Amino acid sequence: MIKAHPFNYPYDGLLDPARTAVLAIDLQVDFLSTDGYFAKKGYDPAPLRAVIAPIKRLTDAARNAGCLVIWTCQGYRADLADANAYDHWRARRAGIEMKRGDAGSLLRGSPGYQIVPELTPFAGDVIVDKTANGAFYQTDLELVLRARSITHLIFSGCTTDVCVHTTLREAVDRKYQCLLVQDACASADAYAHEAALHMVTMEDGIFGVLASLDDVVTGLSALKPVVS
């Protein structure tokens, strides 16, 4: 069991590494770089970059425990077939031209779309490409989770208030048991980050529970991987 708030995780104390996955949301160059999407929107990307080391620690602990690690990447198709006029308008407001090679363009296959090199996925990890804020919308994430019999999800990544929170809410509605690692997620806006954390705990954990990275790593370290 992992020490968490407003109750320990999971509620029944039955944390099985074979049924648990860590989600690392949208830790891409275009989001975390000093000339990427958030920087062009006028935000300081430093808070986003600050979770790189915590997420490495979290994903290492998850693999050692025998849990699945899933990375998500958000962006448009390389041919921009899924970008409408509003998408282009919003990009131009941030000085982004939505073309391959333009920092912050978030086009699949471009260098900026990739996960930051400090967090290169391992063999055996899963990468899910998405076009929306939520990682379940029109992706094969749920197919992967069902195929692996995953029932428990541990969330990290960026941003806390948008893609992390949207995916968390989608997961709760699908009856997954969810935990958000409060110091392994970040927003470019401190107020939005704190508000998103607070919302998880409303109504006695309506969107799951919060836990510190230290407590999650301690809990995962106590698990014994199931050997098939």
Image (cartoon, grey):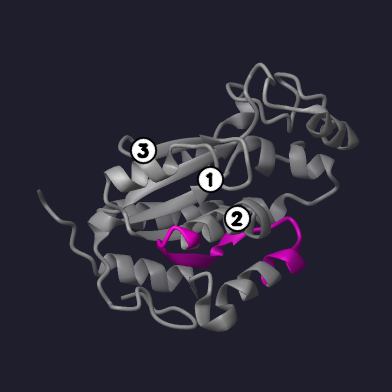
Q: Can I make out residue 144 in this image?
A: yes
- Of the numbered discs 1 and 3, the one sitting upstream in the chain is 3
- Whether residue 41 is in magenta: the answer is no
Quarter location, residue 201: bottom right
Per the rendered image, the range of residues in magenta is 173-194
Depth-wise, is mark 1 or mark 3 nearer the camera? 1
Q: Position of residue 172 (x, y in %)?
A: 48, 63
* Residue at 61% over, 71% down: 197
Amino acid tagged 3? Phe
Label 1 Cα neighbours within 10 Å, binned few <14 / some 14-19 / many ≥20: many
Image location of residue 198, percent across then percent down: 63, 75
Horizontal side of 31 relative to 214 (left or right) equals right
Q: Is residue 57 found left or right of 138 in the rendered image?
A: left
Which amino acid, by three-letter code, is at mark 1?
Ala
Residue 11 position (above or below residue 61): below
Numbered disc 3: secondary structure = loop
Furthest toward the top, the residue is 79
Circle 1 — which element?
loop
**Mark 2 secondary-structure assignment:** helix
Residue at figure coordinates x 28%, y 77% from the top left:
13
Q: Are marks 2 and 1 in contact (CB under 8 Å)?
A: yes
Q: Amino acid at mark 2?
A: Thr
Residue under the image location 61 percent in, 35 percent down: 131
- Residue placed most toward the observer, 123 or 126: 126
Q: Would you say the residues marked 2 and 3 are in contact, meaning their CB atoms lie under 8 Å apart?
A: no
Asked whether residue 51 appears in the rendered view, the answer is no
Q: On the image, numbered disc 3 is attached to which residue?
A: 122
Q: Which residue corresponds to the image point at 59% horizontal and 79% vertical from the top-left?
A: 202
Disc 2 to disc 3, C-alpha distance: 25 Å
> Which residue is the site of mark 2?
166
Q: Earlier in the sequence, mark 2 or mark 1?
A: 1
Q: Which residue is mark 1?
A: 135
